[in-house]
Image (cartoon, rainbow, N blue to C red):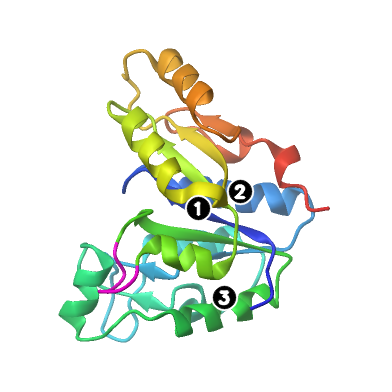
């Protein structure tokens, strides 16, 4: 597959603000005059009737993007149970495989200048017996942005995630998910010292991600 422009957004855990950052990035790109689209390959915790399940994160990405695409293209795999993707797929009696995801991604990449892909959970979340979320990111051939949920334990989670991601990691975003976190400044300084890539933004608790992202980083040459 020909490399596409865009980024793969992963997180140190679930509930760390991947969607918030991904939607902020889409709005940054729109402000720069870049036609961009969001992509949520796999989503759980979806609502709606069988055959028409919808995920709030995928809908948010659709709203923030600048490309009109069918929901099924934005979110090829949608499951109702709010559990790990491979377990939700097992319960539904299907297997999550790369081919439908790669086809949907190619369709979106053909309509946009950049694709912002949001993973599910963290980097090592299983998608099946023989592959994980990180394997999907490698197949999409996109640089990876790590969203770090700033709360107790974030240093270990961030450093382990960065180690697992390896050379694909291009930057990280600190998202303040705990307004009362002790030593926020100290934790940020520790992450800046130890992570091998630049911090692309620090998003305050319930703040607008697009106002805090480093816009110069996301300008397409």
Residue 108 falls left or right of residue 176: right
Mark in the foreground, 2 or 1: 1
Above-or-below relation of 47 to 61: below
Residue 189 falls left or right of residue 156: right
Q: Position of residue 185 (x, y in %)?
A: 45, 14
Camera-side residue of 8 and 197: 197
Above-or-below relation of 211 to 4: above
Asked if residue 40 shows in the view, the reply is no
The residue carrying mark 3 is 105
Farthest residue to the right: give it: 221
Q: Position of residue 181 (x, y in %)?
A: 32, 20
For the residues labelled 1 and 3, say whether their Cβ atoms are less than 8 Å apart. no
**Sequence-earlier tag: 2 or 1:** 1
For the residues labelled 2 and 3, say whether their Cβ atoms are less than 8 Å apart. no
The residue carrying mark 2 is 25
Graded by Cα atoms within 10 Å as few (under 14), some (14 to 19) or many (20 or more), the crowding at tag 2 reads many
Give the distance between the C-alpha atoms of the residues marked 2 and 1, in whole angstroms: 10 Å
Above-or-below relation of 211 to 191: below
**Sequence-earlier tag: 1 or 3:** 1
Q: Bounds of the magenta span?
A: 126-131
Q: Position of residue 35 (x, y in %)?
A: 73, 63
Q: Position of residue 92 (x, y in %)?
A: 20, 82
In reply to whether residue 88 is colored magenta, the answer given is no
Residue at left offset 36%, top offset 39%: 160
Asked if residue 24 shows in the view, the reply is yes
Mark in the foreground, 2 or 3: 3
The residue carrying mark 1 is 9
Q: Quadrant of residue 179?
A: top left
For the residues labelled 2 and 1, say whether their Cβ atoms are less than 8 Å apart. yes
Q: Secondary structure at mark 3?
A: helix
Quarter of the figure with the N terminus: bottom right
């Amino acid at each position: 597959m020909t490399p596409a422009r865009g980024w793969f957004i992963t997180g140190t855990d679930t509930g760390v603000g991947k969607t918030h950052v991904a939607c902020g990035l889409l709005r940054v790109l729109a402000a720069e005059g870049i036609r961009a689209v969001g992509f949520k390959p796999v989503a759980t915790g979806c609502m709606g009737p069988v055959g028409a399940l919808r995920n709030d994160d995928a809908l948010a990405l659709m709203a923030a993007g600048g490309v009109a695409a069918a929901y099924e293209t934005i979110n090829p795999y949608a499951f109702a149970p709010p559990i790990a993707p491979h377990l939700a797929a097992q319960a539904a009696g299907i297997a999550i495989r790369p081919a439908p995801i790669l086809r949907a991604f190619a369709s979106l990449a053909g309509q946009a200048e950049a694709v912002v892909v949001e993973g599910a959970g963290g980097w090592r979340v299983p998608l099946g017996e023989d592959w994980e979320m990180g394997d999907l990111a490698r197949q999409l051939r996109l640089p990876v942005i790590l969203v770090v949920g700033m709360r107790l334990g974030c240093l270990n989670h961030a450093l382990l995630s960065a180690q697992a991601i390896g050379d694909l990691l291009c930057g990280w975003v600190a998202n303040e998910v705990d307004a009362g976190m002790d030593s926020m400044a100290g934790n940020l300084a520790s992450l800046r010292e130890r992570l091998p890539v630049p911090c692309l933004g620090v998003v305050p608790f319930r703040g607008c991600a697009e106002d805090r992202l480093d816009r110069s980083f996301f300008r397409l040459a």
